Amino acid sequence: MAPRVCAGPPPPPLPQVWVWPGKMLAMGALAGFWVLSLLTYGYLSWGHGLEEEEEGAMRAQAGERMETSTTATSQPHLIFILADDQGFRDVGYHGSEIKTPTLDKLAAEGVKLENYYVQPICTPSRSQFITGKYQIHTGLQHSIIRPTQPNCLPLDNATLPQKLKEVGYSTHMVGKWHLGFYRKECMPTKRGFDTFFGSLLGSGDYYTHYKCDSPGMCGYDLYENDRAAWDYDNGIYSTQMYTQRVQQILASHNPRKPIFLYIAYQAVHSPLQAPGRYFEHYRSIININRRRYAAMLACLDEAINNVTLALETYGFYNNSIIIYSSDNGGQPTAGGSNWPLRGSKGTYWEGGIRAVGFVHSPLLKNKGTVCKELVHITDWYPTLITLAEGQIDEDVQLDGYDIWETISEGLRSPRVDILHNIDPIYTKAKNGSWAAGYGIWNTAIQSAIRVQHWKLLTGNPGYSDWVPPQSFSNLGPNRWHNERITLSTGKTIWLFNITADPYERVDLSNRYPGIVKKLLRRLSQFNKTAVPVRYPPKDPRSNPRLNGGVWGPWYKEEHKKKKPSKNKAGKKPKKRKTKKKKQPKAGSFPKCHSGTNRG
């Protein structure tokens, strides 16, 4: 292959040599094959992994591109990668049997966050990331946003992409939304993203992109901006499909202009599905759920490698900040492991809320370090806006902190506490009372708070077993293997020193009543700032059958506007109006009818 031509004086002429005609034909054929390979390389590599020689080619190409491109923006490219249901132990550097070479390398060369917290379930973590506010300040304290609920992230909250757009960022989301969609104003492209490609619901089939919420409530759930992406209904595994889209976005974007990429992978959330070749290294795992989970995580790790290579190839990497996070703890019954932490997804024990997380960036001052300072998912909102040279309105009360100097330079975290949550709707603990809470707090209410080293839980914190690795040796995880704890009768309050006892094995609530009271008062203070819970009942209009077989916005505000209309008498105007109003229903999902018999 001819050497790359650089700027400078022309090279001296090459001596003339005679070439055998047959050799010329062979060289021409090889050159044609080489050009064809370049044209098809990008497509063929998407979703199929990179062999060592292909990876070398990508890195060489990256070097060429970065030499020719200059960084015209002082604003960094922001890449936030959110995994779904990845357990605390389920990364190589936490001792997992599942190999994650990409995550291990990125974390080792960056900053590992080893005191990092998220929420125990999907919607709350995503809402707190995108608003910088606790659930009690958005009304999303209880559960998740269900597909059939007329509910979404409150529209009066300025989102992270909206703030980044204010300072010139191009904003793109790929993956799982799960912040509500009952009206068009709730959709990602109305909440600050220039483009959106992904799913609206919390889960679905990785290949068909269909989801049944209940019998008779089934529909297609893959979107391109605000329309159903029927063109992508071709059986591509979602992890690979989302990575292809990220590569396309980076290939078409000018690296001299800042970009925010929010990549919310569906993996490794159930259903447990993965392409067959990723099972090769995990045949020895007896537990079928753990084996499938391992294959899914291996595919995710490869996808993140491909994203990183794309950042290098297209000239973004040197001015980028890559943040990796899980949205909550793992679910042992679906193959996830949080060992040695207690509890699982959906609980306020450490196994539900302490997450895998790291930051990787050439812009970090202290690379290859471990951060043990307190960090919470709400902190990304002010941190990224500040890095982007944006402004946070003075009248906005955030719960997150700018923690860039903590991560990059090793300074102390400005955060000293975390409100894990107060859920007044969750099933009350039978033996909870105001008396048990010293008249400060009703311990029947599910709540959890962290203040410096101390963590307090009240009410019903959820499934509390420790699930060691050997639990996955059977078709379980088998509870016989679990370290189970029998909660003493009437127990509705727990206190732990998380720094000294990160596995929550020694309850200190009886030994330190003074600290218990202090944390209960802090809970009470937080509760005074809470907004009412938003958890409306199911709306039958949400049924995809009424939307052309697609999950999507169903609430139409026009119904309310009909009454004050001045043209009450004329029937023709009424008909015309209804037709005009009904047309967007079909127009929003142009190919819906072709899919009504699916799923």
Image: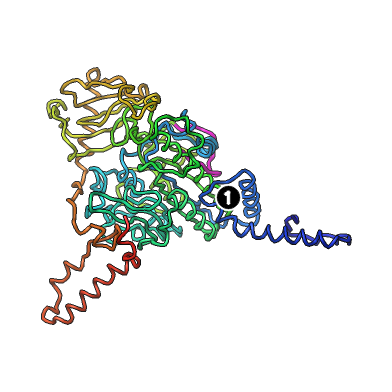
**Quadrant occupied by the C terminus:** bottom left
Residue at point 38%, 28% (across, down) = 472
Question: Disc 1 residue type?
Answer: Glu
Q: Where on the picture, by quarter, is residue 399?
A: top left
Asked if residue 319 lies in the magenta stretch, the reply is no
To which quarter of the image does residue 141 belong?
Answer: top left
Residue drawn at x 63%, y 57% as measured from the top left: 38
Mark 1 highlights which residue?
312
Could you tell me which secondary element the residue under label 1 belongs to? Answer: helix
Quarter of the view holding residue 82 = top left
Q: Position of residue 598 (x, y in %)?
A: 32, 58
Residues 470 and 10: in front is 470
Q: How far from the left and from the top, in percent, is residue 224? A: 39, 60
- Residue 377 visible? The answer is no
Q: Considering depth in this image, is 295 or 421 the residue closer to the camera?
A: 295
Q: Give the color scheme: rainbow, by chain, secondary structure or one colour.
A: rainbow
Residue 331 position in % (x across, y down): 34, 35
Marks counted in the figure total 1
Q: Residues within 10 Å of mark 1 (few under 14, many from 20)?
A: many
Q: Is residue 17 above or below residue 48?
A: below
573 in relation to 527, above or below? below
Tell me if 71 is positioned left or right of 137 in this view: right
The percent coordinates of residue 328 (x first, y second) are 35, 38
Farthest-out residue, top: 511
Q: Is residue 205 left or right of residue 92?
A: left
| Residue 277 visible from this viewpoint | yes
Instruction: From the viewer's side, name the closer residue of 168 and 10.
Output: 10
In the rendered image, the vertical position of residue 382 relative to residue 593, given as above or below:
above
In magenta, the rendered stretch is 358-371
Where the N terminus falls, by quadrant?
A: bottom right
